[in-house]
Amino acid sequence: MSENLDDFRAEVRAWLAANCPDEMRKPANEEGDICWGGRNWVFKNDAQRDWLHACAAKGYTVPDWPKAYGGAGLSAQQTKVFRSEMARIGARAPLSSFGIWMLGPALLHFGTEEQKLHYLPPIARGEIRWCQGYSEPGSGSDLVSLQSFGEDKGDHWQVNGSKIWTSYADKADWIFALIRTDKANKYQGITFMLFDMASPGVSTKPILLISGNSPFCETFFDNVAVPKTQFIGEVNRGWDVAKYLLGHEREMISGGGAGGDMVSIGALYAQVIGKNAAGELDDPVLRAEMAAFDTDVFAFRAMGERFMDMWKTGRAHPASSNMMKYAGTELNKRRHELVMSGAGSAGLEWDSAESRGGSKPRGWLRTKANSIEGGTSEVMLNVIAKRILDLPGA
Amino acid sequence: MPLYHNDEQAMLRDSAAPFIADAAPVSHLRSLRDSGDATGFSRDLWKQFAEMGFAGILVGEEYGGMGLGHAEAGIVLEEIGRNLTPSPFLSTSVAAVSALKAAGGAQAAQWLPRVATGDAIIAIAIDEKPRHGPEGSALAATRAGNGFKLNGQKCFVLSGHVADMLLVLARTGGSAGDKDGLTLFAVPQGAAGLNADPRRLVDASLAAHMRFDDVTVDADAVVGEVDAGWDAVKPLLAAARTGAAAEMVGVGQGAMDLTMDYLKQRKQFGRLIGEFQALQHRAAHLYSEMEIARASVMKAQQLLDEGDSGAELMVSVAKAKAGRATNLAVREGVQMHGGIGMTDEYDIGLYMKRDRALAEYMGDVHYHIDRVARLNGY
């Protein structure tokens, strides 16, 4: 690997030019354009398949993971260069995966060498699709009150209970889940388990949301046997792993507000809204709101860059991902409000071909979950007040 | 370049922060204000700024400066903001130096060494109306003999009454609103026909209305090229706006620190008011806005220092974002202090006043949000 960043940039640029199919350089338009991988994944087209395979072979689905685990072993600065080169040509992520975003970081931090070698490479190659089992019907913001229980049966736990808001549980191959293993100890009585969704006793039921889609499921465990080798960290110390992981989840969700590029929302909707002779958007009030939004987005993008630079080098406040999650998700909700305003009545169409199946209104409604999932905005503000601002009694 | 301070920058901060906090804390501003000081800043302190190397921080080493960039100037500005220090640093060492460096020539050779030694204060005379609009300059410069004759007026000229030299944006061609036909002049204080009317502003600083009645200057008073003054003013504006944004971040941070301390001390209903979630959430939101503002300012500084074409947009983003965030910090500051936040005795109100003046300087939030739209083609 090149030590010099300029050489490295040239190397990445040449590789992308040769390997990223044209189709993968266009913005993702619909759900099927996002590649999630997994045992049952059906590629939308050859380009999506080739792009995943090319990246996986090079370790570029997880560029900063060590090579032994399927990554490319890039340094923080190299990863930044890699991502900026991807963004430069508008390349889509070759693989979207809860395995990459959440389980991977937990395994890298808490896993044994054997676990890393076993679980990480299939994640990097997009062969196993994971889902996350955290929230329960009675345990949302107060997650630590969760009740799903794994009874000790010698060589395995017998798990009973249910999870809710499990993203794509019906499509996932494996689940990482928080399961109570000691009813007497609230914080130190939870184990971070891994098990196959095909295990007897696991069932899922998609939940119809206001968007008309069902990305989330209820997931039920009925006497599911989980071998006592399939956990991360220590038994009864899963809350430590969960807290660590929530940091990554917040980091990931916070990126959503910025999108990957510097596209201005005002510029994007100029054609629909129309311009006056001076070249300004025809609706001066909407123009002002869009410009204020663009200003916030460009500022937040700088924040994202600064956060990642500091996070990767251990300079960031450990709770700062909560701030990123809060600001990023609130920004994304605002974006979609403006998208709806910019689109006018056309943005109301729910299932016409012209509206691509109502992608705007459904997308807008979907974003309302941004500030709920992975910790509500209100919980984020509580954490900032307590851990960063050190306010009393918080 | 990562978006955090490197070791050298951290060292600069570690020397600037205690120096300014010690030599010019908020009480320094109060004593100047309460004594009716007519200069607007302390000349002794400015000498110390020069001895520390701050006055010439952007001046090249060939002229006796430190040869550093906007990121480093921003570190000093943030401390100035945090302490509400009255100082000609922003107009002289940041704005004026940036124009002189860009233009080069005789004026640069004459003034840059004197800025670095602390022997020259330079004021910026650009605006003519209460709302910022550099292209709108109408002050007329007509050819006369070997030089030019200047007629017209300027306003909001910080230190205009005491500066050794003024950088004056004048019109040599075109009409108000055009970027072409502008020329930047270096006009020495004391020039015949130059008249200053200093006015005390809300933050106790002094800004002059300047009148120019047949002020005669030589041809070599032109900074840059005749009719192409915009080329010298553009870097001046970018530097001044980014610098004002950095100073505002300091003001906002100072106001926020005071307020967080107060939330941890003040008791009502038998509890520290910082225990109330109604205040905690607002404080946390403010923290988030301030962090984002700081990142945007650092990004603008970095792009300016790299000569990146994206700097133009980021400068306006930074000025607008720092304006919004700091305005929130001072408003929440006064509100969360309650009644004593309204008293002159407590410092929080001084932060609100300084923020208002900085927010207006070189284009307010609305000006720069509008500019973000224009730069994105809408």
Image (spheres, coloured by chain):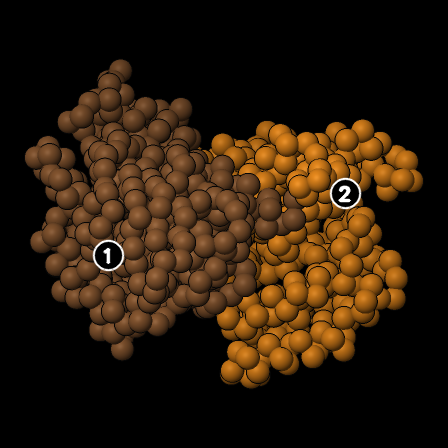
Chain colours: A orange, B brown
Q: Quadrant of the C terminus of chain B?
A: top right
Determine whether, in the image, residue A361 is placed left or right of residue A123: right
Mark 1: give few (<14), some (14-19) or many (20+) Cα within 10 Å.
Answer: some
Of marks 1 and 2, the one in the foreground:
1
> Looking at the image, which residue is at 25% across and 74% down?
B63
Q: Residue B165, relative to residue B259: is it above or below?
A: below
Please provide percent x and percent y for residue A176.
63, 51
Asked if residue A238 can be seen in this view, the reply is no
Asked if residue B331 can be seen in this view, the reply is yes
Determine whether, in the image, residue A152 is placed left or right of residue A323: right
- Specify the subunit that label 1 lies on: B
Please provide percent x and percent y for residue B238.
43, 55
> Looking at the image, which residue is at 54% across and 60% down?
B310
Q: Amino acid at mark 1?
A: Pro
Please provide percent x and percent y for residue A47.
84, 66
Give residue B188's mark: 1
Are the residues flagged by discs 1 and 2 in contact, CB closer than 8 Å? Answer: no
Q: Which residue is mark 2?
A: A271
Question: Which corner quadrant of the image does residue B128 belong to?
Answer: top left
